[in-house]
Image (tube, grey):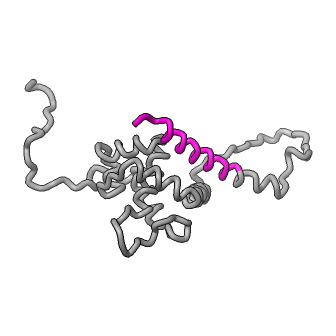
């Protein structure tokens, strides 16, 4: 095996430990998730436990668990058990959570207890993406042709039609949260 690229010896001790930040590229989505959630006011969005209790065992900050959920959403990881397993080998999640690895029950309870806050964050994230023009829209090009104009009820905008996309967004968020709940209940121990 002399003509192959060789990996380093697993038992070799490094003189200087590698920085976890070096493994995450500058354009990685984990950095976007970290920056977005770092700017949120967790208490104002409705998250329980944003202010730590004076007594008892310390808990995870809601932003850590929210980062985990948003990362799971972007990478199609819906189950809290799979999120727990991903915290160990996944370098992006290690970087994002500061090498914290909450158990699946903590993750599931966070989602169950903070549904309103998660909905608020999802709504804010979607609005941010729209403001940054990250969603594509259909573009119509006209080459000088003449078209007959029709302004019937289906083709004009009313206040109800303007509010419909926001209502559909909230319904979509609720469907996703319901799918997460179903995945947690149906996945075997």
Task: Indicate left or right for 79 with 141 as reference.
Answer: left
Residue drawn at point x = 8 percent, y = 26 percent: 2
Find residue 124 and report its horizontal and vertical position in percent: 58, 60
Residue drawn at point x = 60 percent, y = 57 percent: 123
Residue drawn at point x = 29 percent, y = 43 percent: 89
Question: In the rendered view, would you say 45 is above or below 68?
Answer: below
- Confirm whether residue 132 shows in the render: no
Residue 125 colored in magenta in the image = no
Residue 174 colored in magenta in the image = yes
- Confirm whether residue 20 shows in the render: yes
Q: Main secondary structure of the magenta part?
A: helix
Find residue 170 and report its horizontal and vertical position in percent: 66, 52
Question: In the rendered view, would you say 29 is above or below 9?
Answer: below
When asked about the image quadrant of residue 64, the answer is bottom left
Find residue 13 and report its horizontal and vertical position in percent: 8, 48
Quadrant housing the N terminus: top left
Chain part drawn in magenta = 168-189
Residue closer to the observer: 166 or 158: 166
Residue drawn at point x = 35 percent, y = 43 percent: 86
When asked about the image quadrant of residue 81, the answer is top left
Find residue 188 and report its horizontal and vertical position in percent: 43, 34
Quadrant housing the C terminus: top left
């Amino acid at each position: 095996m002399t003509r192959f690229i060789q990996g380093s010896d697993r038992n070799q001790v490094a003189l200087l430990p590698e920085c976890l930040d070096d493994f995450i590229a500058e354009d990685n989505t984990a950095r976007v998730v970290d920056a977005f959630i770092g700017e949120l006011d967790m208490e104002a969005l409705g998250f329980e436990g944003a202010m730590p209790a004076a007594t008892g065992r310390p808990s995870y900050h809601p932003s850590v668990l929210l980062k985990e959920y948003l990362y799971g959403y972007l990478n199609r990881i819906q189950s809290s058990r799979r999120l727990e397993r991903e915290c160990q080998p996944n370098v992006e999640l290690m970087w994002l959570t500061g090498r914290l690895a909450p158990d699946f029950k903590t993750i599931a309870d966070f989602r169950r207890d903070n549904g309103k806050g998660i909905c608020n964050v999802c709504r804010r994230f979607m609005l941010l993406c729209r403001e940054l023009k990250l969603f594509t829209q259909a573009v119509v090009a006209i080459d000088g042709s003449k078209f007959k104009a029709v302004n019937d009820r289906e083709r004009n905008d009313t206040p109800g039609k303007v509010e419909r996309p926001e209502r559909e967004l909230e319904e979509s968020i609720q469907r996703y949260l319901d799918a997460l709940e179903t995945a947690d209940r149906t996945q075997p121990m």
